[in-house]
Image (spheres, rainbow, N blue to C red):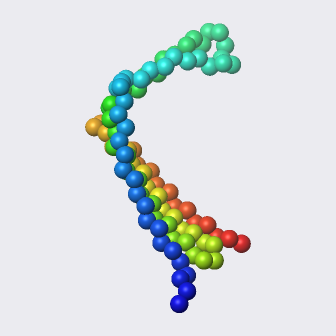
Amino acid sequence: MKRRCCLVVSGRVGATFMSNDDWSTTAQFTAAPGSVGRFTTSLGDNKSFLTVSASVQLSSLKGGDLRIDYEGHFAGESVSNNGKLSLIVPF
């Protein structure tokens, strides 16, 4: 009996540790008039993050794929989640 599809499940867990929890940069717009000066942006955040990702892919021998991806970043005061659904159909 031939296999008609293949299921692949994968995941990843990781951590990021930074030496500083306050990031800032100064910039200016290149095409702005001279009256527009420089500006500074700052981002205060945590020094460590946990990253979790997972993926499920269903592939058929006819070339079609269905894939679901998730990735989350977690820290003391911030959470970021994103996901993606992909469908590949050959024609």
Single out the residue that lies furthest toward the left. Answer: 76
Q: Is residue 2 above or below residue 73?
A: below
Query: Could you tell me if residue 74 is visible in this image?
Result: yes
The residue drawn where x is 37% and y is 30% is 18
The residue drawn where x is 54% and y is 68% is 66
Based on the displayed image, in which of its 4 quarters is residue 10 positioned?
bottom left
Q: How many marks?
A: 0
Single out the residue that lies furthest toward the right. Answer: 91
33 relative to 16 in the view: left or right? right
Residue 2 point in image, percent of width and height? 55, 86
- In terms of depth relative to the viewer, which is nearer, 30 or 50? 50
Residue 42 point in image, percent of width and height? 43, 22
- In terms of depth relative to the viewer, which is nearer, 50 or 36? 50
Residue 16 point in image, percent of width and height? 37, 37
- In terms of depth relative to the viewer, which is nearer, 91 or 14? 14
Single out the residue that lies furthest toward the top. Answer: 35
Single out the residue that lies furthest toward the bottom. Answer: 1
- In terms of depth relative to the viewer, which is nearer, 83 or 59? 59
59 relative to 21 in the view: left or right? right
Q: Is residue 60 above or below residue 33?
A: below
The residue drawn where x is 48% and y is 62% is 68
The residue drawn where x is 33% and y is 31% is 47
Residue 28 point in image, percent of width and height? 59, 17
Query: Could you tell me if residue 79 is visible in this image?
Result: no
Locate the C terminus by quadrant.
bottom right
Q: Is residue 49 above or below residue 55?
A: above
